[in-house]
Amino acid sequence: MLKNFCGCRSPCPIPYPILPVAKIIAEAAHIVRSAAQEARRSFLDRDGIVDRAQSLLDPLIYEYFDVIPSERILVEDTVSISFGSFRPSVRRQRIPAIEPSTSETRRRYTDRLCKTLNGWARGGQSLVRGSEAVSEKMGLGLVTLEKVGAEHLGPLPHGNGALLPALDRLRDVAAIKTNTFELARGIKVFDGPRLYMVKPLDFRYWSETAALNDADEIAGSILMQYAENIA
Amino acid sequence: MSFFGSAEGWIDLLERMLPELLYLVMETWGTIARPFADDKEDHITELLCRSLHHNRTVRDLPFYIHTQMVELDPAPGQKLGRLDIVFLPTGLPGAPNEAIYFCLECKRLNVVRNGQKRPGGSDYVLHGMVRFVSGQYANVVRHGGMLGYVLNDDVPAAITNVESNVQNHHVTLGMEPPGLLHQSSIITGLSTARESLHRRAQGPTPFRIHHLFVDAKGPQT
């Protein structure tokens, strides 16, 4: 019955006919039945059994709905960040989207951004490398991307020491005459082979979804420049 | 987020994107089941677009793919155009917007009706290529594409017919005489890909049209 039809009433996409839907369903059913049997035998670790079964089922669910890795990031960020941030209550005051980002989060953001752009650039002469610097005092982070020859791809040096001079340079490049720090939140500045992005430190600006959106914006700017310039 | 500065120095980063799009169109074409239930142009284009939407590589690219997009601002006196397949960058402000990165115009060639073959090269040129050259389509960019569905599987004859029509109309098409279709410079290894260079009175010039000819043999009619 489920071969070409999603049984739930939510607006899910119907699996694309080329997917081995029956095989996925059989595998999922096997995991659920095994977990149920295991749970009958064990009274102590039922939560663990459910978690393990869920972790085995998740990839199958993504496969069933033909969710590709970049789309999976959006789904997971929506569940872990957006859902948790909607309508905070007195009992649930933590708002993941506006919590301060960690250095690990920011590193993941930069990695995802570079990987996405480099995925689109594959086969070409150039690639992108990036680094991030932050000032918690100012509440600002600066992502620096550098376009380099494919043979020179390596890490871009990190360091908070570079933040102030970099912001000073950005002020010149972007020619912002008014309050720099207010305006500088959320800008991208192309400067020769470098691209600077100034961001607030809130988590939502450093999620992997944000990286995918930023990669989209950067690509949009480059593609239109390309389309207009290249003969 | 606002952008400052020029992306000029970054252009070569995504230089392979256009050929990749064209390769993906060809790859996706190969996955469509034939013969078609209906060999009308719009039906074939719709099938192709649907398959493009499901292609995992295409879904990872920063484009929206639309079919039959209505051109909102035709020039005075111009007929309202429908762009067969358009690739719109997802990351532009207000996207999807009118800043079309790449438009693919589709035409049928070698249509056989009641035993009579209609080559269709003239329609390909006058109602396809000319729309790019006149600036009706893709008037802010320098590249456009033509996709020829060859319905009787004689692709070489279809290309020859289009070439001869291009030569006949090379002045209208803003081409250097004699008006040649060259082997594609960005899609290598595909004998049915061509390109042509055009001067335009409106919009960025020179303008390059990438031509793809595909075997679309449909049911006998």
Image: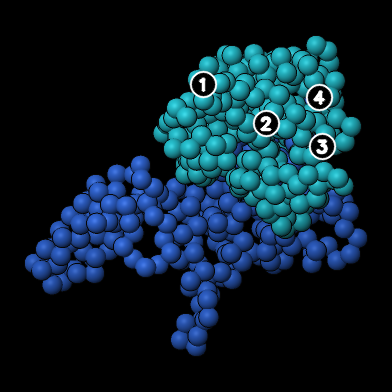
Chain colours: A blue, B cyan
Instruction: Quote the CA–CA distance across marks 3 and 2.
Output: 14 Å
Residue B115: numbered disc: 1
Mark 2 residue crowding within 10 angstroms, few (<14) / some (14–19) / many (20+): many
Relative to B96, does residue A18 appear above or below in the rendering? above
Q: Nearer the viewer, mark 1 or mark 2?
A: 1
> Which corner quadrant holds the N terminus of chain A?
bottom left
* Eye-nearest disc, 4 or 2: 4
Q: Are marks 1 and 3 on the same chain?
A: yes
Q: Amino acid at mark 3?
A: Gly
> Can you identify the residue that label 3 sits on?
B135
**In screen coordinates, is B39 left or right of A163?**
left
Disc 1 with disc 4 on a shared chain:
yes
Q: Contact (CB < 8 A) between labels 1 and 4?
A: no
Which residue, given by chain and number where applicable, does mark 4 sit on?
B173
Mark 3 and mark 4 lie on one chain; the one further toward the N terminus is 3
What chain does badge 3 belong to?
Answer: B
User: In the rendered structure, which disc, 4 or 2, sits on the residue that comes first in sequence?
Assistant: 2
- Residue A124, how many percent across, how many down? 62, 28
Question: Which subunit holds the residue at mark 4?
Answer: B
Give, as a three-letter code, the residue at label 2: Gly
Question: Are the residues under marks 3 and 2 on the same chain?
Answer: yes
Q: Is residue A179 visible?
A: yes
Q: Nearer the viewer, mark 1 or mark 4?
A: 1
Q: How many labels were placed on the picture? A: 4
Q: Which residue is mark 2?
A: B145
Q: Spatial distance from mark 4 to mark 2, Cα to Cα?
A: 14 Å
Q: What is the residue that sits farthest to the top in this orientation?
A: B178
Nearest to N terminus: mark 1 or mark 2: 1
What separation in Å lies between label 1 and label 4 (alpha carbons)? 32 Å
